[in-house]
Image (cartoon, rainbow, N blue to C red):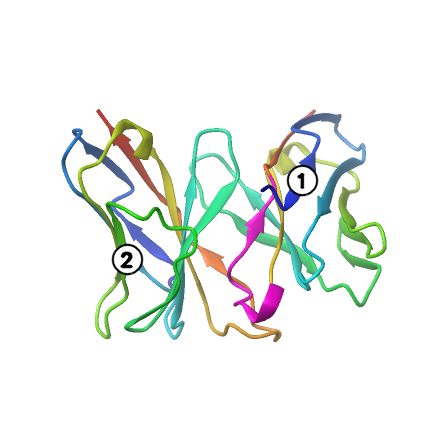
Amino acid sequence: NAGVMQNPRHLVRRRGQEARLRCSPVKGHSHVYWYRQLPEEGLKFMVYLQKENIIDESGMPKERFSAEFPKEGPSILRIQQVVRGDSAAYFCASSLTRDRAMNTEAFFGQGTRLTVV
Amino acid sequence: QQQVKQSPQSLIVQKGGISIINCAYENTAFDYFPWYQQFPGKGPALLIAIRPDVSEKKEGRFTISFNKSAKQFSLHIMDSQPGDSATYFCAGSGAGGTSYGKLTFGQGTILTVHP
């Protein structure tokens, strides 16, 4: 049973370039969440998506960041015109349901470590 | 505004000792409180979780104690082992009908267990 798969594991971008981070959820999971972890800090929620829909983007910066979860294929977090402050670990998580149930658990991927030089 | 406060930032324990990590939350609408364990270079993994209708949950060497009136909960690791050395995060979720996968994390505690 494959878990949450993220790629690439490491990504280096120059300032001004675009970064694309991919996330394939656990098979059968239709709820995907993106989190950002700055050095020596906790994880901060960015966005919650369900197939083809953005449900909650309250943690997403208003500019340069976007996310999608198409009907087919992985979820994508896109960062345009990256700046040094975007350097962080970006984690994707998925869950089977969104409701209070036994299978509420959010499973995390291993993350993509973005370095902006 | 930080909604989940975690302490201590770091903790050193001898093998066989008890590790205790504390969290306090502000959002009384949270009704799911998981603890995640993260090893360097890895993603967080669910360790144990509790809902506010119980005051304690135990799984093996790991116990969550929950105090709803004080809005606090803690993780106790009994008989701590070097393999437990990791970063631990508490979290809350479920507020206001939001998805339980939308987690508000504490700042994390780096646990080191010396052999």
Taking the image as shown, residue A64 lies to the left or right of residue B31, namely left
Q: Secondary structure at mark 1?
A: strand
Tag 2, which chain?
Answer: A
- At 37% from the left and 63% from the top, the residue drawn is A2
Which residue occupies the foreground of this view, B61 or B32? Answer: B32
In the picture, the disc for residue A67 is 2
Q: Which contiguous range is marked in magenta? A: B94-106
A116 drawn magenta: no
Work out which residue is located at the far left of the displayed protein and give it: A17
Tag 1, which chain?
Answer: B
- What is the crowding at mark 1: few (fewer than 14 residues within 10 Å), some, or many (at least 20)? some
- At 28% from the left and 73% from the top, the residue drawn is A52
In which quarter of the view is residue A14 placed? top left
> Relative to A29, does residue B7 appear above or below in the rendering?
above
Amino acid type, mark 2: Ala
- What is the crowding at mark 2: few (fewer than 14 residues within 10 Å), some, or many (at least 20)? many
Amino acid type, mark 1: Lys
Which residue occupies the foreground of this view, B50 or A26? Answer: B50
In the image, residue A82 lies at what x, y percent? 22, 36
Q: Quadrant of the C terminus of chain A?
A: top left
> Relative to A102, does residue A21 appear above or below in the rendering?
above
B101 drawn magenta: yes
* Residue identifier under label 1: B5
